[in-house]
Image (cartoon, grey):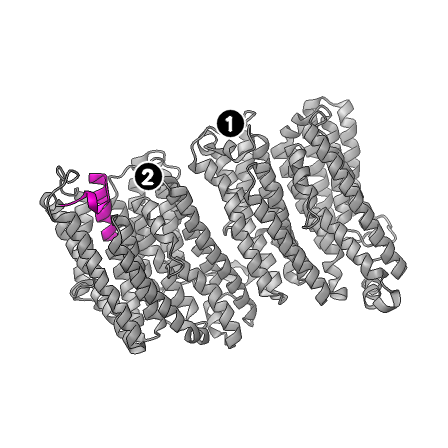
């Protein structure tokens, strides 16, 4: 029942939001609903309740409405549940036209995300995969920046092509199962021949790689992050890209072991290329949003590489890092949004010396920046350490090349901090004031999580052990 | 049998109602007549009451055909309810339009129950001839006249090819029957019957490709759809097209266990499917007029429906039923809104979400369904088509080509959504939008979403 609630609360409250005429009421209602989801999400993490749900859905097709929750699902549903209240509070002072529709769509996308992380039936998974995408399409296209229509459309077409290819893959798996079923168990029980695996593997992987995104399928991402309203960007980069990683762990590697072995090296190579490439571009950026976008590609690349290195320790690292990266990147976006809202620009060349005017924000950002370069005692260190460990066991050279991107990461991240917050004040920052209470409050929570899980990551590590099968 | 007789009778009744009744009552009479038709068909479907006439085995009624009739009649009902007032606005002879539509339905019901090439031919003709008239019903509009003439000439030409094919098959087998033994001898007996039977089959195939506007026999479709009054384009592009497909599949796929899918046959279909998807989708991308875009998109959708011919298994039948319902409902909805727009171009839809939020929202659902986005009926329609192809072990390349074109179709369908929601403008309608019209649209959109979540809701009627 608990997993069902995680989906039902956002769906129902989201649909209700559309009928609220008052903008503020919609905002408060959405915040309330997301907190309710968070409570349920926290409850689900403790190991006391029943975590499966199963109901008939479309018997004709052999698909059932099956949800289940293991450690991996718990980490990601928890991330989803935490992110939305963080986003809603930190952007509480932003005003949106037709805000009832905005918050309604946000909640619907949360439902889609929850469903993706919970579904144990392949067709159901596909449904939620799409359900998470459609609201985001409308969110970005209506409330985004200047070039929003073209950029979001590119993003949509990219991911939609991926989904359709995945659908073909899903269908071919379906007809191979002896009992014609989409259930996770039946799919896992398949013993596919190498030739069957080779093509179908790619049908799935392209969909996931677009979502993550992995070089060279990443071109939609920086534009989409830049043009989306910041609240949506936070969800996109904090939670939505994790769909791709999650799907690889849940639906790709266990089903196609032979193909994974065969193509794993190629994919790791692509991921490492992507990491270095994205880091180099990030160094050259003049825009906070684009910098965070490219830095996000680099982080995701490391996760993907660690996944395909097929080492348990690397996998544990990936699972922890999914959570940590989600939290950290949301924190970075909040800072970026606060700066843009206050000063009207995101360009480094027009910023400087902000630390004198906004000391609290500067301290909070500094912690997040350290987390972004995975300094010890921050949460990202644990995950990245484990991932590098796994990658190192797989291949020295790959690990070494990936290590370069850590150094590059320090270059662009610290450069960003320095150019925005230190040096002399410029025109834009002359009359700046510190961030408002909502932003400070949320950033403090995030920083506490960053340091807390950095010092004591054991709760998360425990969750990564509870993966079935 | 009920539906064939009743639809012909209703047609006659409608003709007389033009003389006997005031103009305002005609639409309601038509809706009432359609309800009678629906009840009559359902009575036969559930085996409660059937008018029995010995047709000497020329017609045979099965559940699939009767269920298809039901879908068609319900679609027409939706069409009358949403677009009835637009039919009244086309010209003066309102009763005639409704009468002609009933005659088309008569042809459709024959096409779902034919048991031989003779009745098949009659069905095609009864369905087509009223359409030639409807296409030209806007008498003072040159484009409408042109469309009508073009449709008539091309249509008769394809009918000629059809007849030639039937003649050849008759010559080869000595029968109009579709009994598998006869067709089997036509095919397996290539050597004894000579070249006649296979040529006959190919001619039949070509003329049916023409009727369903599959490339490369599609050239008439955009001009005819564009030229005829929008309200009749809607009818042609949905109900008539679906019926054409049903007949096509009944004629070929149902019997293909006997004469195919051999390698040559599969190759022909492969080429035609890819060509249809290619031409339909790529040309639609460049259209500025929504009406013309829909004409090409209907060609593209035909490419998907052809999948049902490609593979014959239990998915095919469900698939074509679901596809018909999903595609017809969505397209009827889109056209009913289009007919009320001042300007048919993409720019004419700019800002519709501000001026007519209900129209924009429902239109979005319809377009999402046509694109095959999950949670709409269109998704399962496409799903079934792809599933049937994969299940029958068809080349996966064809399926991948099809989904890539489905992604292309998203491009042009979403342009309308973008215009309605993300662009500034003052989309104007040419009549006042009544609350009942809005309600009808909302119900139709709800049905599409319900079918998208529970396709069993429709297929359940068929199976249980």
Residue B103 in sight from this viewpoint: no
* Residue A253 badge: none
* Residue A26 badge: 2
Q: CA distance from mark 2 to mark 1?
A: 30 Å
Residue A226 in sight from this viewpoint: yes
How many C-alpha atoms fall within 10 Å of the one at disc 1: few (<14), some, or many (≥20)?
some
Provide residue B280's location: percent of width, then percent of height.
Answer: 61, 48
Q: Is residue B171 or residue A47 the one in the foreground? A: B171
- From this view, report whether residue A44 is shown above or below residue B279: below
Is residue B17 on the magenta stretch?
A: no
- From this view, report whether residue B20 is shown above or below residue B53: above
Comparing marks 2 and 1, which lies closer to the viewer?
A: 1
Q: Is residue A56 or residue B174 the one in the foreground? A: B174
Provide residue A117's location: percent of width, then percent of height.
Answer: 38, 60
Q: Residue furthest left?
A: A356
Residues in magenta, as a range: A329-352
**Quarter where residue B219 is shown:** top right
Query: Which residue is the site of mark 1?
Result: B428
Residue name at image x 65 percent, y 43 percent: B238
The verdict on a common chain for dots 2 and 1 is: no
Is residue A334 on the magenta stretch?
A: yes
* Chain containing mark 2: A
Residue name at image x 62 percent, y 67 percent: B393
Provide residue B289's location: percent of width, then percent of height.
Answer: 57, 36
- From this view, report whether residue A253 is shown above or below residue B268: below
Provide residue A425's location: percent of width, then percent of height.
Answer: 12, 42
């Amino acid at each position: 029942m608990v997993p069902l609630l995680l989906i039902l609360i956002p769906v129902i409250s989201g649909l209700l939001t559309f009928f609220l005429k008052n903008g503020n009421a919609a905002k408060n209602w959405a915040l309330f609903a997301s907190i309710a989801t968070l409570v349920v999400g926290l409850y689900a993490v403790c190991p006391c309740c029943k975590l499966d749900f199963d109901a008939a859905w479309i018997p004709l097709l052999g698909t059932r409405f099956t949800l289940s929750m293991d450690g991996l699902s718990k980490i990601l549903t928890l991330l989803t549940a935490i992110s939305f209240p963080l986003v809603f509070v930190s952007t509480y002072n932003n005003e949106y036209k037709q805000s009832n529709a905005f918050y309604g769509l946000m909640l619907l996308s949360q439902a889609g995300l929850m469903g993706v992380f919970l579904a144990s039936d392949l067709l159901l998974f596909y449904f939620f995969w799409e359900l998470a995408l459609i609201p985001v399409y409308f969110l970005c296209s209506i409330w985004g920046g200047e070039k929003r229509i073209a950029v979001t459309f590119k993003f949509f077409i990219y991911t939609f092509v991926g989904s359709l290819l995945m659908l073909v893959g899903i269908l071919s798996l379906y007809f191979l199962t002896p009992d014609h079923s989409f259930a996770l168990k039946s799919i896992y029980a398949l013993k596919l021949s190498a030739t069957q695996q080779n093509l179908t593997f790619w049908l799935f992987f392209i969909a996931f790689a677009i979502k993550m995104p992995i070089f060279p399928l990443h071109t939609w991402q920086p534009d989409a992050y830049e043009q989306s309203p910041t609240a949506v960007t936070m969800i996109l980069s904090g939670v939505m890209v994790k769909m791709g990683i999650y799907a690889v762990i849940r639906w790709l590697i266990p089903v196609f072991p032979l193909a994974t072995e065969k193509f794993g090296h190629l994919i790791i190579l692509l991921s490492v290329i992507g990491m270095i490439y994205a880091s180099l571009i990030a160094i050259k950026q003049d825009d906070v949003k684009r910098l965070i976008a490219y830095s996000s590609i680099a982080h995701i690349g490391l996760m993907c590489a660690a996944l395909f290195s097929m080492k348990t320790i690397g996998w544990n690292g990936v699972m922890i890092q999914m959570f940590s990266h989600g939290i950290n990147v949301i924190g970075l976006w909040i800072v970026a949004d606060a700066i843009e809202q206050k000063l009207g620009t995101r360009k480094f060349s027009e910023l400087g010396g902000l630390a004198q005017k906004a000391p609290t924000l500067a301290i909070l950002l500094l912690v997040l920046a350290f987390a972004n370069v995975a300094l010890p005692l921050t949460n990202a260190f644990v995950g990245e350490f484990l991932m590098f460990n796994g990658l190192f066991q797989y291949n020295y050279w790959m690990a070494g090349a990936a290590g370069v991107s850590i150094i590059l990461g320090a270059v662009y991240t610290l450069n960003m901090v320095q150019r925005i917050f230190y040096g002399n004040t410029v025109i834009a920052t002359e009359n700046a004031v510190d961030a408002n209470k909502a932003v400070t409050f949320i950033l403090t929570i995030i920083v506490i999580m960053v340091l807390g899980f950095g010092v004591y990551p054991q709760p998360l590590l425990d969750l990564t052990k509870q993966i079935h099968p | 049998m009920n539906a064939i007789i009743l639809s012909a009778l209703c047609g006659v009744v409608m003709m007389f109602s033009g003389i006997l009744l005031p103009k305002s009552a005609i639409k309601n009479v038509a809706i009432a007549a359609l309800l009678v038709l629906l009840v009559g068909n359902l009575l036969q479907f559930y085996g409660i009451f059937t008018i029995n006439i010995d047709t000497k085995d020329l017609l045979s009624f099965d559940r699939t055909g009767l269920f298809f009739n039901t879908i068609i009649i319900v679609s027409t009902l939706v069409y009358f309810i949403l677009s009835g007032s637009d039919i009244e606005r086309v010209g003066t002879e309102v009763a005639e339009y409704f009468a002609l539509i009933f005659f088309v339905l008569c042809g459709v019901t024959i096409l779902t129950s034919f048991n031989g090439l003779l009745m098949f031919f009659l069905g095609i003709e009864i369905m087509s001839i009223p359409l030639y008239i409807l296409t030209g019903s806007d008498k003072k509009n040159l484009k409408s006249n042109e469309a009508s003439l073009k449709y008539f000439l091309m249509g008769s030409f394809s009918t000629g090819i059809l007849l030639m094919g039937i003649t050849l098959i008759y010559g080869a087998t000595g029968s109009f029957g579709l009994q598998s033994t006869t067709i089997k001898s036509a095919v397996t007996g290539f050597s004894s019957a000579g070249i006649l039977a296979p040529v006959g089959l190919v001619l039949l195939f070509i003329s049916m490709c023409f009727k369903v506007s599959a490339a490369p026999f599609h050239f008439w479709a955009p001009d005819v759809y564009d030229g005829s009054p929008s309200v009749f384009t809607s009818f042609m592009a949905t109900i008539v097209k679906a019926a054409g497909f049903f007949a096509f599949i009944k004629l070929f796929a149902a019997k293909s266990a006997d004469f195919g899918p051999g390698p040559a046959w599969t190759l022909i279909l492969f080429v035609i499917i890819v060509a249809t998807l290619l031409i339909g989708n790529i040309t639609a991308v460049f259209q500025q007029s929504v009406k013309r875009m829909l004409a090409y998109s209907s060609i593209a959708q035909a490419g998907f429906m052809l999948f049902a011919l490609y593979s014959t298994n239990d998915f095919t039948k469900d698939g074509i039923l679901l596809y018909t319902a999903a595609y017809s409902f969505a397209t009827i909805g889109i056209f009913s809104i289009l007919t009320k727009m001042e300007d048919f171009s993409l720019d004419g839809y700019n800002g519709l979400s501000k001026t007519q939020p209900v129209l924009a929202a429902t239109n979005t659902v319809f377009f999402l369904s046509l694109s095959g986005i999950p949670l709409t009926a269109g998704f399962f329609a496409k799903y079934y088509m792809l599933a049937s192809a994969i299940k029958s072990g068809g080349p996966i390349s064809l399926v991948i080509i099809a989904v890539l074109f489905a992604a292309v179709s998203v491009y042009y369908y979403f342009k309308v959504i973008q215009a309605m929601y993300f662009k500034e403008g003052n989309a104007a309608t040419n009549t006042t939008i009544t609350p009942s019209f809005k309600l009808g649209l909302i119900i139709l959109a709800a049905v599409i979403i319900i079918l998208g979540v529970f396709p069993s809701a429709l297929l359940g009627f068929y199976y249980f």
